[in-house]
Image (tube, rainbow, N blue to C red):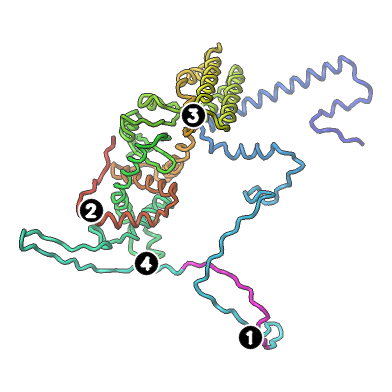
């Protein structure tokens, strides 16, 4: 018996005689009807999916789907079936990556006197099989140091002086190691303050409470505020800054956390405003660089030197094409234009060639805008393209500018995860700590520095600086 493809209805093979013209037409009509039903079902399912993944879904949400589709584009005969449950790993043909073997701190000779099977005594070793084992030492109990700070009085001017020590804090009873670990446990390991207290007690036998963990974390934030302001000044001088914002709660009320990101610095700002006053405050009203952003109205109200995010507009175009058939050629043309521009910019273009490419691309966008479409998602899409017409093609003339705002969206991932864990910030002090420590951590990672070492350094340096100046306790809420 000859097997037939499963995709073809079996009823087409029920008769051995040649089908008549009428039968063929009848079957074609039936297939067309079935095809139309499948189209409608596909449309319903995609509409349902849009409830969960709208046009503003960041690229990271679609990453797994993109990887799956890209992996299925190759020759199926070359693909070996996965046997590891689909977990990521080294791809076929790639060289393995090995950890560098550490130098041992000690060597222990592991010997055996006799055969475990028959009891015969061994004369000498026939060889050695070394094995490196990395282990953490048992957690050490806290060291308690009493600093006897001597007081002095100047006989000449009458001034009173209290002797200081770099490891003796001016406030609290915990040293820099404790407060640095508390801050990292909260903002790098995302532990609740109660769990931070439990961790110190379990590992070190240190009597610690949730309130102590909060005050230790606040101390690091206050100590790091000077470096926070240095990050702000570095970003103010940058040529290109990626900016984005997302919601956060302050005592249950709506607030916003903004991110300002460059290649080496990231600054977070928690404010109750989502308006143009925030970038004006952070970057300065005379900021001369380029702002890479989405279509939120605060950005053109702040600056005219913008690069609108192509990832956003392409997702919105795809969504509009799903909702209206008139949007399909527009989405296709927009995507083709973006791919063509990216391909063209891979070559080393002169300033004149970039200017000409920019003019050609603008005419392409203008031709899209001129299309006549009925009211609906496609008309809204064209309105957005027209509203940002001066800002879609900045990246062509400025090589340092990215056409997408993925850098800022990636920077917002950490605050979004923390938002799901902590729920709400209680007050201005909480907003101050939140924005400060997030900024220090993100910048440390960008620059390849160890956050724990940096937090200890910041806390230790602050003890000396704080004796000469007062550090603000809370931040302005904007």
Identify the residue at image location x=68%, y=24%: 39
Between tags 3 and 1, which lies in front? 3
Residue at the farthest top position: 372
Against 433, is 408 above or below? above
Identify the residue at image location x=90%, y=20%: 19
Between tags 3 and 4, which lies in front? 3
Residue carrying label 2: 466
The quadrant of the rendering that contains the N terminus is: top right
Name the secondary structure under disc 3: helix
Name the secondary structure under disc 1: loop
Residue 52, percent across and down? 54, 33
Against 108, is 332 above or below? above
Q: Please, what is the dominant secondary structure of the magenta stretch?
A: loop
Q: What is the number of the mark on residue 205?
A: 4
Residue carrying label 3: 395
Which span is picked out in magenta? 121-136
């Amino acid at each position: 018996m000859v097997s037939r493809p499963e995709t073809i209805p079996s009823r087409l093979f029920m008769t051995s005689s040649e089908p008549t013209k009428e039968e063929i037409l009848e079957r074609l009509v039936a297939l067309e009807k079935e095809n139309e039903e499948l189209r409608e079902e596909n449309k319903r399912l995609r509409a349902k999916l849009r409830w969960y993944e709208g046009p503003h879904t960041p690229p990271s949400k679609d990453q797994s789907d993109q990887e799956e589709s890209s992996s299925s584009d190759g020759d199926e005969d070359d693909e070996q079936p996965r046997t590891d449950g689909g977990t990521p790993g080294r791809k076929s043909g790639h060289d393995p990556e090995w950890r560098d073997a550490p130098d041992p701190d000690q060597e222990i000779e592991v010997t055996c006197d006799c055969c475990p099977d028959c009891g015969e005594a061994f004369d000498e070793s026939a060889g050695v099989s070394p094995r490196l084992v990395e282990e953490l030492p048992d957690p050490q109990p806290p060291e308690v140091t009493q600093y006897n700070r001597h007081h002095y009085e100047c006989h000449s001017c009458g001034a009173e002086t209290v002797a200081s020590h770099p490891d003796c804090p001016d406030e609290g009873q915990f040293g820099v190691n404790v407060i640095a670990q508390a801050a990292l446990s909260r903002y790098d390991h995302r532990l609740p303050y109660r769990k931070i207290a439990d961790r110190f007690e379990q590992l070190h036998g240190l009597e610690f409470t949730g309130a102590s963990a909060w005050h230790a974390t606040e101390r690091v934030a206050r100590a790091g505020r000077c470096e926070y302001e240095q990050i702000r000044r570095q970003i103010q001088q940058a040529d290109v800054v990626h900016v984005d914002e997302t919601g956060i709660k302050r005592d249950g009320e709506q607030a916003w956390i903004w991110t300002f990101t460059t290649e080496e610095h990231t600054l977070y700002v928690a404010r109750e405003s989502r308006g143009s006053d925030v970038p004006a405050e952070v970057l300065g009203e005379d900021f001369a660089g380029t702002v890479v952003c989405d279509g939120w109205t605060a950005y053109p109200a702040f600056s005219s030197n913008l690069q609108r995010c192509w990832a956003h507009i392409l997702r919105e175009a795809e969504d509009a094409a799903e909702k209206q058939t008139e949007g399909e050629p527009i989405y296709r043309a927009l995507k083709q234009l973006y791919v063509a521009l990216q391909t063209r910019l891979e070559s080393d273009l002169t300033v004149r060639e970039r200017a000409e490419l920019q003019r050609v691309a603008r005419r392409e966008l203008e031709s899209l805008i001129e299309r006549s479409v009925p009211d609906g998602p496609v008309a809204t899409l064209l309105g957005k393209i027209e509203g940002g017409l001066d800002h879609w093609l900045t990246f062509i003339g400025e090589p340092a500018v990215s056409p997408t705002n993925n850098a800022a969206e990636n920077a917002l991932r950490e605050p979004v995860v923390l938002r799901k864990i902590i729920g709400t910030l209680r007050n201005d002090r909480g907003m101050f700590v939140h924005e400060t420590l997030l900024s220090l951590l993100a910048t440390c990672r960008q620059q390849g520095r160890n956050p724990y070492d940096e937090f200890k350094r910041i806390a230790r340096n602050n003890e000396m600086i704080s004796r000469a100046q007062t550090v603000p306790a809370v931040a302005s809420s904007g």
